[in-house]
Amino acid sequence: MNYKILAILMLVTLAFAACDQPDKNGRRRRSASLLTPVSSGNHYEVMVVADDSVWTGYAGAALQRILDKPLLGLPQQEPQFHKSHITPAHYDKITNLFRNIFRIQIGREYTKAKLTVEKDVHSTPQMILTLNVPNQVEASVYITEHAKGIEGLIASEEINRTANDLYFQHNVKFAKKVKEMFDCEFYIPVDIKKMKVGEDFIWASDDGLSSIQNICIYSLPYVSEKMFTKGPYIALRDTIMKRNIPGEKPNQWMQTNAEFVWTKNISVNGQFAMEARGLWEMRNDAMGGPFVSHTRLDQKNNRVIVVEGFVYAPDKMKRTMIRRLEAALYTLEIPDNGQQTTDKNNGKN
């Protein structure tokens, strides 16, 4: 066989293999495909393909309510998603490369509403949601009844994309320090590289000029399931942050704005976690911004591990920044953790 042809075949095989590799836990971690174009559009942007009458009618209004819904935990209102609209006549080889597409197709041939999901059809990464319905009223009803699921599907897809990218490109120095101190895997963006180490605490920052993105990880001895409820979580967070993130003056330190904190129970890699999001502030100073955190149980070492991202970006929109940090939280892996038994009825607002 010609060696040039053999080399090309080997490269093609590697391209397929690199696109969808299972990790040690059996999860799929996708890298950018070498065989499809890179998708267009920004993170958390959705292009809706529908007739003008549908976009301005009941169905379009129902979908726009989902896309325009404010993201919880930000100091100013920002929609969860940016949106754009084109008609089916303009859905072609250029527009079909968009990263998130929602198609509404209405026709008499459809006997009932049905939503299908396709991945990486024309570009990578990409998700195409297609709703086939017999009429616009049923489209509106279906979208309204499945609003939470549609919202979660798009958001989780974007989070997974960012988290998966971090497995391939991340701050190696930070990851090594986390492994050394906590015996965990945890990956953060490469530009968040300024690091401060405390007692069972690591704080990393990009130290930007006009905005600052931060990630920290810390651990506490496990005491009770109450650590996964809102009140005790805030008290513990304030204690840790006062010790590790002081202000410029002795009477200044980071604290939680307890009036604006929301918690809920989630699953991360099949394990229980408590998500908290809300606002932080610098005591006796004007600084503040949004944060999001995951509180996880490390059964093997009888401890609680918290990972958190927080942003300081006055006069800037913060949704994309906090979502980027939130995605990094999903990369935390606690080895040999076993089956988590924490009561998932705890941690409610």
Image (tube, rainbow, N blue to C red):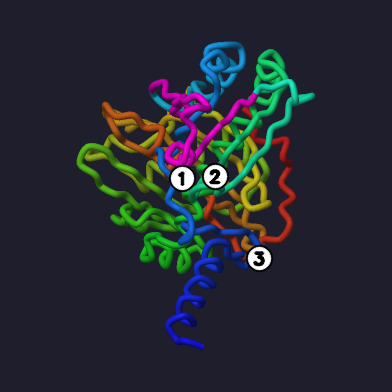
Sequence-wise first label, 3 or 2: 2
Say what secondary structure mark 1 lies in: strand
Local crowd size for mark 2, using a 10 Å CA cut-off: few (<14), some (14–19), many (≥20):
many
Query: In this rendering, does residue 286 appear at all?
Result: no
Q: Which residues are magenta?
A: 76-105
Residue for badge 1: 308
Residue for badge 2: 294
**Rendered view: 309 above or below 176:** above
Label 1 to label 2: alpha-carbon separation = 6 Å
* Amino acid on which disc 3 is placed: Asp
Mark carried by residue 286: none
Circles 1 and 3: CB atoms closer than 8 Å: no
Residue for badge 3: 336
Q: Quadrant of residue 61?
A: top right
Q: Residue at x 27, y 29 (%)?
A: 314
Q: Quadrant of residue 311?
A: top left
Question: Camera-side residue: 210 or 102?
Answer: 102
Label 1 to label 3: alpha-carbon separation = 22 Å
Q: Residue at x 54, y 20 (%)?
A: 51
Q: Position of residue 224 (x, y in %)?
A: 66, 45
**Rendered view: 88 above or below 1:** above
